[in-house]
Amino acid sequence: MRRLRRLAHLVLFCPFSKGLQGRLPGLRVKYVFLVWLGVLAGSWLAYVHYSSYAELCRGHVCRVVICDQYRKGIISGSICQDLCSLQQVEWRTCLSSVPGQQVYSGLWQGREVTIKCGLEESLSLKAGADVAPRRELVLFDKPTRGTSIKEFREMTLSFLKANLGDLPSLPALVGQVLLMADFNKDSRVSLAEAKSVWALLQRNEFLLLLSLQGKGHASPLLGHCGDLYVTEGVPRSSGPAATLPALLRPLLPPALHGALQQWLGPAWPWRAKIAIGLLEFVEELFHGAYGTFYMCETTLANVGYTAKYDFRMADLQQVAPEAAVRRFLRGRHCERSADCTYGRDCRAPCDTLLRQCKGDLVQPNLAKVCELLRHYLLPGAPAGLRAELGRQLRTCATLSGLASQVEAHHSLVLSHLKTLLWKEISNTKYT
């Protein structure tokens, strides 16, 4: 003990200790400054997160507007009573990515659901007293009072022809629309029912869901109220940042995306099963009963899956009918090919002589999906499969030529890829 006291006395009174004591106030200032900087940065991130959340997540506005119009008798639907009168639709986590399309996970009748509701930007900024009347005038203006069921049927058929093309299968789809409108099965379609289903048809994703029902790769529709609709389950996203808290996702360096996908995503055989489902979905889009569809935002964030690792398209907003894409491109002025882009990555060539966009897309769905699968499937692939899988994905990703002219090659490449993946996971627990 005496030796320790003597050592402490030497430390306190040596010249070096005086220098250390002299620097302590400066060190304290540095530490205080760093702490203050950390608090400031954290507060700023929290503010940005809250601001973006408040802008993106306005489910309460949707609920107020929809229920107000339901009580006025303007709209109707199979879940209106549960949503507005009985309060039996539970809104949970906000999943919206844009203010105009409100998306929430929820609970209805004891099952997990996804709730989707369109919200125009002009209405999402404030929920004032005049919101419901203005939205009624904008969205629920058709059909008008006095429209017969025959006229409504013709009106629906004309709309579907304009958006999907003149197809022999459309009358069956019109019948499906009318059947959905008559949710109470009284063999008649009221004005409120007709207004509701007409408003739903204006939503691109709803039109796609209706066209793809029964195929297994789009979430089944469970019900609607006005232009709000509910689908089964909440697909998990394959995006590399999907398992991270929303606040941290913008801070994620791009270099870590692939590593996170391998560490936090499903095991490789499950990824192979999801990929097979995605390839089958591409087949449906190319050979569907209601025409051809184009994937115009091909990202992993849109590749969803169920608890059993069955593929589900997480977001159909950027899947567009061929007729709609051609209408957008036809006669469009351009200086370069980038000017002929529908959505994010549906690009057509630019005729530099006429300075107009051509109608056919340069890159087919399959080429874009295969480029995506190179990053999704090759990391962690079995050693004996990696070389052949890489070769087939490279061949597939380089598919070019006009999308309407690659049907035979498209089908062959897709078939080879599915067979290769199925051989690897067949007769295992992953099938």
Image (cartoon, rainbow, N blue to C red):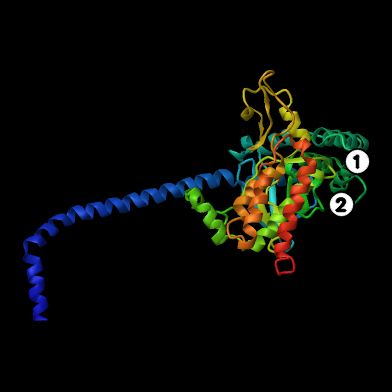
Using the image as rendered, state which of residue 332 and residue 418 is in the foreground. 418
Q: Amino acid at mark 2?
A: Asn
**Residue 3 shows in this picture:** yes
Q: Look at 62% across and 30% down and name the residue there.
A: 338
Using the image as rendered, state which of residue 253 and residue 406 is in the foreground. 406
Q: Write down the quadrant of residue 2 in the picture.
A: bottom left
Using the image as rendered, state which of residue 114 and residue 384 is in the foreground. 384
Q: Write down the quadrant of residue 12 in the picture.
A: bottom left
Rendered image: mark on residue 408: none
**What is the distance, in whole Å, between disc 2 and disc 1 at their CAs?**
22 Å
192 vs 262: above or below: above
| SS for dot 1 | helix
Q: Position of residue 232 (x, y in %)?
A: 74, 56
Q: Look at 75% across and 31% down and name the residue there.
A: 326
141 vs 356: above or below: below
Q: Left or right of 264: which side holds 105?
A: right
Quarter of the picture containing the N terminus is bottom left
Q: Amino acid at mark 1?
A: Pro
Q: Left or right of 7: which side holds 214?
A: right
Circle 2 or circle 1, nearest the eye: 1
Q: Position of residue 406 (x, y in %)?
A: 77, 39
Who comes first in sequence, dot 2 or dot 1?
Answer: 1
Q: Position of residue 189 (x, y in %)?
A: 88, 43
Q: Write down the quadrant of residue 123 in the picture.
A: top right
242 vs 119: above or below: below
75 vs 34: above or below: above
Rendered image: mark on residue 184: 2
Q: Look at 73% across and 60% down and name the residue there.
A: 422
**Residue 107 shows in this picture:** no
Q: Look at 62% across and 51% down and name the residue there.
A: 374
Categorize mark 2 by other alpha carbons within 10 Å: few (<14), some (14-19), many (20+). few
Q: Which residue is mark 1?
A: 171
